[in-house]
């Protein structure tokens, strides 16, 4: 006769609305194994929106602060996983932002457990998607910059960290710029992982919005790296690099450096290039649209320089074709029309 297989990694769950209070009560057990089983069961329950709502509105989150400081690394890891599941919903993100859990959670950025650190970054990244979350995390930007210097950190953590920095920098670039962010991101732009290159280029685009960021991009010799990324195999990497160039060439130093790097032929190629695959794939077409618009805006700024205007006058038919084609995307057509006006402008 076969024996009964018992689930030893999860706590027994009460029926219906009693499940959440019962499991949160078991989190106060002195045995680490009991706390681990209760957390595992709670993680399973948080996939149910009704149970998640009950956990958030029932005032149970305050109990997690003690668990974030637990001596057992598995308890800390599972607690962060629970918070990650809670932040999948807006009500969970709002509850976490209004709670006292952020300070102890941020302390786990240096936790000894890689799984725990990964879950912390997942939570912070979800919070950063909200403007209120990005604002709350601005004070953590210097620490996140320090974490990026740790080359031994796994790829997913680096990608999440860069994504969080991008969200925060779109709200306020000062903390990242003051933490030598441009120089650090320049190093990440050459990473072998396309995911890291993509997020690093996105963060660089955010940092290049203010004038101080534009100057730092020029001073730190970032433009040669960005120009190289325009020919990357990943369309999003190309688009983010083009966006950073678009922002930087607004200032005279950026224009002159890009013209010295002979970026015009590369940008014109991006504007003219079209493939059947991109036309058939909606998501890829959307990424391609951003790339073309950024390239056209960069060309528009470069046309303000005499050398740039002279070279672009020779390519005017291409720009006119994209500005007049009735089947062209409206936003691309408008950007091309602006480029044509600037290129053909005469005093």
Image (spheres, rainbow, N blue to C red):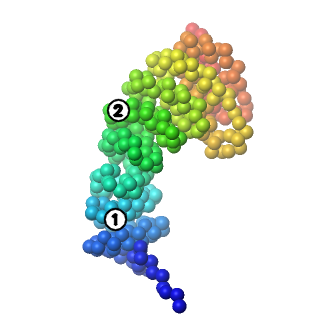
- Establish if 73 lies above or below 331: below
Q: Is residue 334 visible?
A: no
Q: Are marks 1 and 2 in contact (CB under 8 Å)?
A: no
Q: Label 1, secondary structure: give it.
A: helix
Which of the two residues, 211 or 33, is positioned nearer the viewer here? 33
Residue shown at 54% from the left, 37% from the top:
237
Residue situated in front as seen by the camera: 332 or 10: 10
Vertical position of residue 93 compared to residue 192: above or below: below
Depth check: give the residue in front, 189 or 88.
189
Mark 1: few, some, or many residues within 10 Å (few <14, many ≥20)? Answer: many
Q: Residue at x 43, y 42 (%)?
A: 162
Q: Which mark is residue 180?
A: 2
Q: Residue 273: percent from the left, percent from the top? A: 68, 30
What kind of element bears circle 2?
loop
Position of 242 compared to 86: left or right? right
Which residue is at 34% across, 47% downward? 136
N-terminal of the pair, mark 1 or mark 2, is 1
Q: Position of residue 292 (x, y in %)?
A: 61, 31
The residue at which mark 1 appears reads as 75
């Amino acid at each position: 006769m076969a024996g009964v297989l018992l689930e030893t990694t999860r706590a027994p769950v009460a029926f219906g609305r009693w499940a959440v209070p019962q499991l949160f009560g078991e989190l106060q057990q002195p045995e680490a194994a009991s706390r681990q089983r209760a957390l595992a069961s709670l993680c399973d329950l948080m996939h149910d929106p009704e149970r998640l709502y009950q956990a958030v509105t029932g005032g149970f989150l305050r109990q997690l602060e003690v668990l974030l400081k637990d001596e057992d690394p598995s308890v800390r890891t599972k607690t962060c996983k629970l918070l990650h599941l809670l932040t999948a919903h807006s009500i969970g993100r709002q509850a976490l932002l209004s709670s006292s859990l952020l300070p102890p959670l941020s302390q786990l950025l240096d936790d000894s457990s890689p799984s725990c650190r990964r879950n912390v970054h997942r939570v912070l990244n979800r919070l950063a998607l909200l403007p209120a979350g990005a604002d709350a995390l601005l004070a953590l930007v210097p620490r996140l910059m320090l974490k990026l210097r740790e080359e031994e950190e796994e790829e997913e953590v680096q990608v999440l960290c860069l994504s969080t920095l991008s969200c925060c920098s779109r709200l306020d670039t000062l903390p990242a710029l003051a933490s030598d962010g441009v120089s650090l991101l320049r190093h990440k732009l050459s990473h072998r992982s396309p995911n890291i290159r993509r997020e690093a280029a996105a963060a660089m685009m955010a940092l290049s919005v203010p004038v101080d960021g534009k100057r730092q991009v020029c001073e730190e010799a970032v433009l040669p790296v960005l120009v190289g990324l325009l020919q990357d195999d990943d369309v999003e990497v190309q688009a983010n690099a083009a966006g950073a160039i678009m922002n930087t060439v607004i200032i005279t130093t950026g224009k002159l450096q890009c013209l010295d790097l002979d970026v015009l032929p590369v940008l014109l190629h991006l504007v003219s290039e079209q493939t059947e695959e991109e036309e058939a794939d909606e998501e890829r077409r959307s990424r391609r649209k951003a790339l073309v618009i950024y390239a056209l805006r960069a060309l528009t700024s470069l046309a303000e320089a005499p050398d740039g205007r002279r070279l672009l006058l020779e390519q005017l038919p291409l720009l006119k074709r994209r500005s007049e084609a009735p089947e062209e995307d409206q936003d691309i057509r408008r950007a091309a029309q602006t480029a044509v006006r600037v290129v053909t402008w005469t005093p």
